[in-house]
Amino acid sequence: MSRAHGSARGQGSGGQVRHRASWGSAWLGAVVQLWAGVALAQSPPDVPAHLPPDVPADLPPDVPSDVPADVVKEDVSAIELGELPLLPELPLIPSDPASLQEATEAPDEVVVGAARREQSLGNVASAVTVISGDRLRRFGYRTVAEAIAAVAGVHLVDDRLSTRVGIRGLQPIGDFNTRILVIIDGTSMTEAWSHLSGVGYDLPVSVDEIERIEVIRGPVSSIYGTNAFLGIINIITREALAKARAWGRATAAQIGGAAGSAGFATGTPDRQVRGAVSFAWRRGEDLDYLGVSGLGRDKDRGLSVTAALSAALGATFAQIRVYSSRREIPFAPYDGDLDVPYTQTNRQLVADVSHTRQWGRLQMSGRLFTSVYRFDDRASKADGGGPLLVVGEARTLGADLRGRYQVLDEGRLDVTGGIEASYNDTGDSSQIDGDVKNIGEGLRFDLEGFYAELESAPTSWLGISAGLRLDRHSEFSKRGRLSPRLALFLSRDDRVGLKLLYAEGFRNPSTYEAYFTDGDDVLENRELEPESIRSFELVGWARPTPATSLRASAYRWDAFDIMKQLVVDMEEGDGITQFQYDNKDQYASAGLEFEGRFLDSRGWLAFAGVNLCTVTSVEVSTVDPGSERVVDLAGAPRVTASFGVSSPLLPGGWHASSELLMIGSRPNRDGAERSPAHVTWNAVVYLPSWRGFDLTVGARNLMGIREQVPAAEDFDREDITVGTVPGEGRELYVRLGRSLR
């Protein structure tokens, strides 16, 4: 395995050791038995199963401006999510001002993922942004990555190996989103071998399935444990309708190539079945790179396929999701041959079943989940050797049990507690030119978590939340790690408020980082320790008008024992080096963040956000372990900003939407040039009803200036330090869809 794998994947497994967990497996068995007892009870019809546990049935709906008249004219407050259309309706209708305003405001004020239950934005112990389904359609987003790119404090790093997410300046170059938790309908997508979390086509959900996306900033380990380090991306999919529907959509794009999705939904909110399939074939583009002109698009291809099936029966919900994503990289990482594209494939299957039961003031929920993951890559060698082939695999089986008890009425005191356990089996292998270099026997490990949370609202203007979680890893933290979270909420008439927030989080080493060795240039390090982060934040929010929401945050994040890939000597004086992870870095991010949203009864939608921060890294010298220096973190922008506006339905029945995304200049690795500031301008025209179809015509990066994306050392050549790789150019695309009752 080349050095690129070390930086690009960020973790792994392997090694020659096989570890068996003891008391963790016993806990897993106990959880399964408890869950089975809960599930056998009769399910009350008023507990929704399609949402994560603890979510009440009166979640406000998302009614876009193109909802049919027979729905809009009803009492919107009485509409269930499951009664809303799966896709925009075909008839063009006038907007009823009062109903439209009530419906379009409500979803942006409700959060589910921050505490695994429904909360208002003013009572969430994090700074949260909600992207509604209406906004997804109006701005023509094709992936989750495109949707979150305009969120305040978020920036994307797309070096074509993967779409990486940075939050408040923190995105270690080469990391594969291992410090962000991606959740779909209550189930984590993070796999056990390398902790990969995809947000593009390497994610088992199509954007056409999504009802809303929640971006939750900061550590949430007190609820979710490991990997909820920098934040959470919580994805909630759409419910079925009271009557059967089918839908389909096709996309053609200059760079993205061809894509399509189709699905069905049938039933009621309490009895429903939903299914969807999608594919995306990347056409690619011609590039100039390292003095090579016209690097062909045949080296910039990709193919992704996803499928999902979910069902709800009363208070029981089940889903299964699978994806396969193959990507070809034209930049010859790992000192490869520029004439032969590097190829990477990720495949994953996730499934879970959950049940919720109410006994008076007590609500109990249980869940069983599993995940199977496989990674393959193929890298050519510029010196004619190779190719280098690496395979990584992971299998996970787990369960959790959660209870919430209402001690006092009207939210004056609620207590939540739960346990979670999983068993993980990982392994890998590598070979060069057919010669097997390593067959990892595998690492087996248990994860266990025990958590409790107390919430109290003694008055109408004061709220308090306190949570604590203990996590144990059978390999890396046998004694356990504590993750506290504290929050104080002050508000007045639900129009203005203040939040004081404190939280701690952690991330365990992946088996890739600690145990993988490829027999060539990557060395394991079984002495790695978990990373940790501490967050302080002051949040002010206001609703000066019914159509306007504002938020301002002042924050400081301190991260310790960050795992970083280093160059080490195999034997002193022989000039041969290898790459190895070590807990060498400390990060600090401090800054101000502002965000605003506008949505009125006429259908105007606008948003804006800016993040100003200083991000530093305390680096320990590899030559002199006692020497440290404070530097600007490589790849961290001091400024990110976004602005977007979408019109109401204009004469002719179309929305016009446009957004600007700005990222400031960024330092790069030592010896590499700085990445200059970049502005991306996107524009979309969306017709919810055009001759019986919905039509989207969009353009991304209209100015055509390529972003110079910070590059990991994976892209370095033997005699060249590659600081940046070119981003995508201008792209036009068209989407055409149809939904049937």
Image (cartoon, helix red, strand yellow):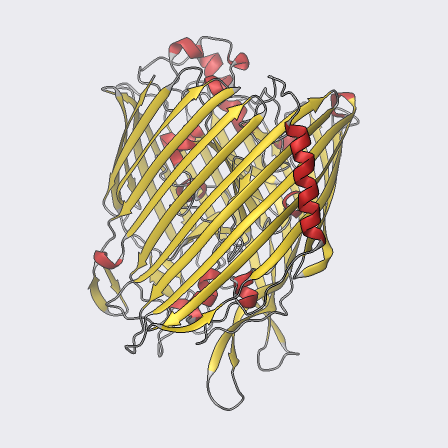
Which residue occupies 42% across, 57% down? 375
Q: Position of residue 719 (x, y in %)?
A: 35, 79
Residue 551: image quadrant is top right
Residue farthest toward the bottom in the current orientation of the protein:
573
Residue 631: image quadrant is bottom right
Asked whether, in this view, residue 652 is left or right of residue 710, the answer is left
Which residue occupies 69% across, 51% down? 24
Q: Is residue 735 above or below residue 531?
A: above
Q: Nearer the viewer, residue 480 or 119?
A: 480
Q: Nearer the viewer, residue 130 or 224?
A: 224
Could one spot residue 229 in this view of the protein?
no
Which residue occupies 54% across, 14% down? 77
Q: Nearer the viewer, residue 613 or 251?
A: 251
Q: Position of residue 438 (x, y in %)?
A: 46, 71
Could one spot residue 522 in this view of the protein?
yes
Q: Is residue 646 above or below residue 514?
A: above
Total numbered circles: 0
Q: Position of residue 236 (x, y in %)?
A: 50, 33
Q: Nearer the viewer, residue 654 or 61?
A: 61
Which residue occupies 30% across, 51% down? 302
Quadrant placement of the N terminus: bottom left
Asked whether, in this view, residue 540 is left or right of residue 607, the answer is right
Quadrant placement of the C terminus: top left
Q: Position of residue 601 (x, y in %)?
A: 45, 18
